[in-house]
Each structure stands twice: as C-alpha cells, then as structure tokens.
Image (cartoon, helix red, strand yellow):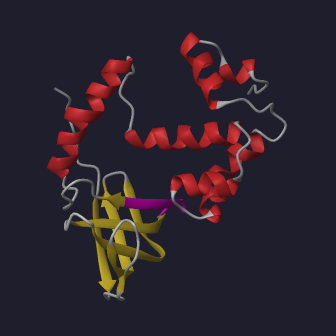
Amino acid sequence: MIELEYEMTYAEDIDGPLGPTAGSPLGERLCWQVVSATLRGPRINASLAMPGTDWMRLGLDGVRRPDLRVQLMTDDGELILFRYVAKGGGGEWTEPGYEQWINHVWMPALERVGLAYQRPYDLRHSFASLLFHEGRSVIYVSRQLGHSAAVCMRTYGHVIEELDEAPRISAEDAIAAARRGDDVRRLFGRSE
C-alpha cells in the first residue's frame, strides 16, 4: 500500500447565487462569484488571482454536482488553475476520497501500463506539451485545458518558444518513440 501525505486545503468566500442558467444540455446551473480563496499546504501557498466561479449544476438526472474554477497566484508568483468537477453523485473531494481514488484508480492504472509513480497533474503538462509539439494553437490548447489563452501563454510560453523551429510531430509518434526508449528530443530535432 502506498503512503500518502496531506498536500493542501482549499477555502473560499463566495457571493451569490447570481441566478440560474437554463437550456444547457448539461442541465440548469447556479453560479456564485468566488471573491476570495486560498490554497494552503506544506508545499503550496496561493491566493485568488482574479474572481472565479463556483457552479452547482443540476443535471437532467436530478443530481447536483459542483464545478469550481478559479485562478490562484502562488506566493512565488506562479499562476495556477484550480478546478474541481464532481463526477457521479457529486459532493466534496475530501482527503479520504482523494486517497481512495489514488489507491483504487490512479495507482492500478500506473501499474497496468508499467509506469513509476507520478503526480496526476503531470499528465496535464505532458498533454499540453504534446499538443504544442503537434503545432496546435494556444487557443486550441487553452480550450482543451479549460483556461484562458493568457494563462496558457504564462504556463507554457517556454514550451512554445522551445518548439518554435522544431519539426511538428503527432502526439502518437512522440509517445511511440518514447515507449521504444528513443531520445525524443534528439530524434525530433530538439536538443538541450
């Protein structure tokens, strides 16, 4: 069994609700304005960078599901997108719930594909980098990640610059090369 440790606690103050939306194929939504928020833990200290939204979606199945999206600024100046979307029956993403997901979903998935432990969040960065390597636009990548083009540029600007003169390759080809053990950076014209 894997040892887990506490990472962070998220807290927010909200105004609202601002009123329901209707007619969405996902069902009715209520929205609250997130006016202050903090993300605190042993390795992170962040506060709300700009107002965000805290949605509560009433699905067509009658179940309410939270959908939180805020941008936070760490105390060392990094901008991060914090998003929580409840699946299934909804409810809070608690520390025990996260531990259960890590132990029963994430770790078995890593074992099935033969990978050593890595943070789930690292997949997001790999996904974005692969899309940029394919030559996808900042707008396309930001939509895939669920945040603005400005946040995408601040987070991945170095990747875009690094790939400026590099040949474009498909994510599938890059992944296949990495699985073969090839030096992907050298193979596709990027060396450090």
Q: Is residue 52 above or below residue 114?
A: below
User: In the depicted view, which residue is nearer to us: 96 or 65?
Assistant: 65
Does 77 appear in magenta? yes
Can you give x and y, in whole percent of width and height, for residue 38 in the image?
35, 69
Could you tell me which quadrant the N terminus lies in? Answer: top left
Count of numbered badges drawn on the protein? 0
In this picture, residue 117 sits left or right of residue 192: left
Q: Quadrant of residue 163?
A: top right
Residue at (73, 27) in percent of width and height: 192
Above/below status of 116 relative to 158:
above
Q: Is residue 97 magenta?
A: no
The part of the image, by quadrant, that contains residue 168 is: top right
Q: Residue at x 29, y 64 (%)?
A: 10
**Residue 156 higher or lower than 51, as above or below:** above
Please provide the residue range marked out in magenta.
75-83
Nearest the viewer among 62 and 64 is 62
Please tell me in which quadrant of the rendered image residue 121 appears.
top left
Q: Residue at x 22, y 41 (%)?
A: 101
Q: Residue 126 appears at what percent x and percent y?
A: 54, 37
Q: What residue is drawn where x is 62% and y is 36%?
A: 130
Taking the image as shown, residue 179 lies to the left or right of residue 183, namely left
